[in-house]
Amino acid sequence: MSDKKVRVRFAPSPTGGLHLGGVRTVLFNYLFAKKHGGDFVLRIEDTDQSRYVKGAEEYILECLEWCGLKPDESPVTGGKYAPYRQSERKAIYREYAERLVMQGHAYYAFDTPEELDHNRKEIPNFQYGHAYRDTLRNSLTLKQQQVDQLLAAGEPHVIRIKMPENENIHFEDMIRGHVSFDTSQSDDKVLLKADGMPTYHLAVVVDDYLMKITHAFRGEEWLPSAPVHLLLWEYLGWKADMPQWAHLPLILKPDGHGKLSKRDGARLGFPVYAMSWLDEKTGELTPGFRELGFLPEAFLNLLVMLGWNDGTDNEIFTLDELIEKFSIERVNKAGAKFDFEKAKWFNSEWIKRSDAKSLKSDVIKVLTDKGVVVKDEKLLLTVIDLVKERCTLLPDFYHQSSYFFEQPKEYDLASVKPKWTDAKTEFFNAFISMLGNTEASFEPADLEQSFKSLAEEKGIKAGELMLPFRIMLVGGKFGPHVFDIAVLLGKKETIGRIEKALEAFNN
């Protein structure tokens, strides 16, 4: 670690939903920065205006806010190195592209899209690089006078890097160790497009330099671009300031074969985006972890375990604990298989560990969205603590707690009627009379004892009565201890529910 202040960045393109792999990249950036007292920068890479999607930038910011990964510098918060949208930095990039041309490390290319398409069709595996550049229309093959005339006339052109032949370049990756490349395997990437916008390759290098980024975390799919970036750092004279790179392992499909995609989620029935994303052009809604009912703490926890561990068997970490324990040395090289059942386990564990007050607003939203009115928030807090161990996702709180605030709309009669008898009707009528006695105790343990004693008196096994009693109170075969439910409902409500259910059971 150098003496420079640690500065990391997440630089997404505003083109759609945020994949869980993208959020994991944010998380690793954030943990590394906070571990070392550094800054986490959000930079929007919107140079490809043809792929820009309205609302995508706001979506990204909302995702980070939901996750609790707040940038120190961003297009919204500003900062010393503003602007943080590449489209607003357009004027900066041409200077560096032109400098590369002057040095002989880049060149103007005047080929039309139609000419390039023709070459791709006619030449197998065509690449604009050392093998074919001398046969194409560029400043390497045209005379200087022709180039000057074309530029003066405003002829559309791009600027391409001139990749050297048969050079071996290398760097030390923080995760993968020594990585080397043969430059002959790389084509002459476009650095500046015809519209004056930079491509990712130029912009990422220029911006990382100007924003003094010290460490760059990105997915391993960017490794093939590394030779271009390495050379740009060298050619621009900034090699000493190049960030340390860490190429993160892929998040794989559940079977381990290939990178997890949106299609996999749709096919297998789970989200791959942090939050739901509505594509305004197609009308397609892609579901997200937030809307499915994941807590942000659980989402981050499951993400960090996809490729990292602290060297122990512990799997549950708060964000503060992750900041304390995180080290890049413990990030794996191999891809991590995504397991949705394991993801749900993380969420259930976090629901169990969360106190009722922290869950209250989420549970109220779940209930009100289903038309359940919560008037007694003190009761709600008690209910949350009572049922949270039974909930895997936040919407489960509706099924597990709505009956505390409204009477069952229907009963699981199929579980009651086949074994229903007049003797059981008589028992519950007697139980109602017993509850109506103002002197009778209405605490769970005492209520249970009275229930069982009455059953014994009536010559009925208590076990045969417990399920009907539960269904009377909640409508089905679920919920916490039935006598806890009765006590929370209160004596009057419990009697009313028994009376109403008896009518249904006896019809």
Image (tube, helix red, strand yellow):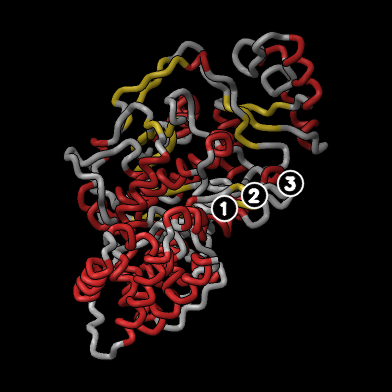
Distance between the alpha carbons at the discs numbered 2 and 1: 7 Å
The percent position of residue 192, horizontal first and vertical second, equals: 64, 37
Residue at the (72%, 16%) spot, across then down? 120
The percent position of residue 332, horizontal first and vertical second, equals: 30, 31
Q: Are marks 2 and 1 in contact (CB under 8 Å)?
A: yes
The amino acid on which the numbered mark 2 sits, given as a three-letter code, is: Leu
The amino acid on which the numbered mark 1 sits, given as a three-letter code, is: Ser
Residue 282: assigned label: 3
Name the foreground residue: 501 vs 351.
501
Question: Residue 362 occupies which quadrant of the picture?
Answer: bottom left
Crowd tier of the residue under label 2, counting other residues whose Cα lies within 10 Å: few below 14, some 14–19, many 20 or above:
few
Q: Secondary structure at mark 3?
A: loop
Residue at the (48%, 39%) spot, across then down? 205
Mark 1 = which residue?
A: 276
Question: Residue 79 occupies which quadrant of the picture?
Answer: bottom left
If you read the primary sequence from the N terminus, does the residue marked by circle 3 or circle 1 appear first?
1
Name the foreground residue: 68 vs 192.
68
Q: Residue furthest left?
A: 312
Q: Are marks 3 and 1 in contact (CB under 8 Å)?
A: no
